Each structure stands twice: as structure tokens, then as C-alpha cells.
Image: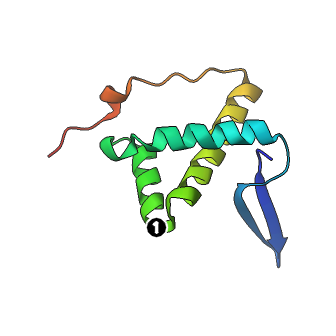
């Protein structure tokens, strides 16, 4: 349930958002965390926030929340597999000054 749903046909592979299989509670927490983070993306100028805002305008609030949850799940999985921890600079250092 934390991996993207996949559909393959004619040699083309399509990846979708989070499937409804797997741990319901963990999936719910990921989506709630994404919704919480989305409350602050409009005020930020980092690449992930800009991606979320563009997706929200194109596809809507719910699809953007699930997409962000899926992206976060992939990041967390990669960190766990590699045995690494997430180290990011504070958000105020990511923002670029307005021109």
C-alpha cells in the first residue's frame, strides 16, 4: 500500500499514487502528514513546496495530498534501505529572497 500502484500495457508502465493495499493506519498517517505539510507550502519557495503548489492548482487538494504522501513514502523507504537519516537545512535557509 505504500508503493505506487502499477499498470503496464503495450510496453508502457504507468505508476499511480498510493494503492489501497497494505497497512491502512500507516497510509492514513502519511496522508495526514502530507495535508499538514501542505498548509505551509504556499509560503515557502523550496522545490518541493513549488511542486506541491503546482500540482494542487492542476489536480486539486486531495490528489496533491496523496501524491505528496506517496513521494514521502518513497523518500522514507530509500532512507531506511540505505540506513541513512534525512538531513535538511532549516526551511528559512531553503527560501530564496524575492527579486
Residue 91, image x, y percentages: 37, 29
Q: Residue at x 26, y 38 (%)?
A: 96
Residue drawn at x 83%, y 40% as measured from the top left: 23
Colour scheme of this structure image?
rainbow
Q: Where is mark 1, residue-wise?
A: 58
The answer to which image quadrant residue 63 occupies is: bottom right
Label 1 SS:
helix
Nearer-the-camera pick, 11 or 49: 49
Q: Position of residue 17 (x, y in %)?
A: 69, 56
Q: Nearer the viewer, residue 65 or 50?
A: 65
Residue placed at 85% from the left, 50% from the top?
21
Foreground residue among 15 and 36: 36
Residue 33, x across and y down, in percent: 58, 37
Instruction: Kindly indicate the quadrant of the structure image that contains residue 98.
Output: top left
* Left or right: 74, with 47 as reference point: right
**Relative to 12, 63 lies left or right:** left
- Give the x, y percent position of residue 58: 46, 67
Extreme residue toward the left, this view: 99
Using the image, determine if residue 88 lies above or below residue 64: above
Dot 1: few (<14), some (14–19), or many (≥20) neighbours within 10 Å? few
Q: Residue 41 lies in what quarter of the image?
A: top left
**Would you place residue 87 above or below residue 45 in this image?**
above
> Is 95 left or right of 98, judged from the image as shown?
right
Amino acid at each position: 500500500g505504500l508503493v505506487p500502484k502499477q499498470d503496464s500495457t503495450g510496453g508502457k508502465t504507468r505508476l499511480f499514487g498510493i494503492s489501497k493495499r497494505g497497512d491502512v493506519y500507516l497510509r492514513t498517517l502519511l496522508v495526514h502528514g502530507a495535508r499538514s505539510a501542505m498548509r505551509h507550502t504556499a509560503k515557502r519557495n523550496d522545490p518541493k513546496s513549488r511542486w506541491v503548489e503546482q500540482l494542487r492548482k492542476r489536480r486539486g487538494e486531495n490528489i496533491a495530498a496523496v501524491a505528496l504522501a506517496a513521494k514521502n513514502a518513497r523518500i522514507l523507504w530509500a532512507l531506511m534501505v540505505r540506513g541513512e537519516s534525512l538531513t535538511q537545512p532549516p526551511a528559512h535557509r531553503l527560501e530564496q529572497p524575492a527579486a
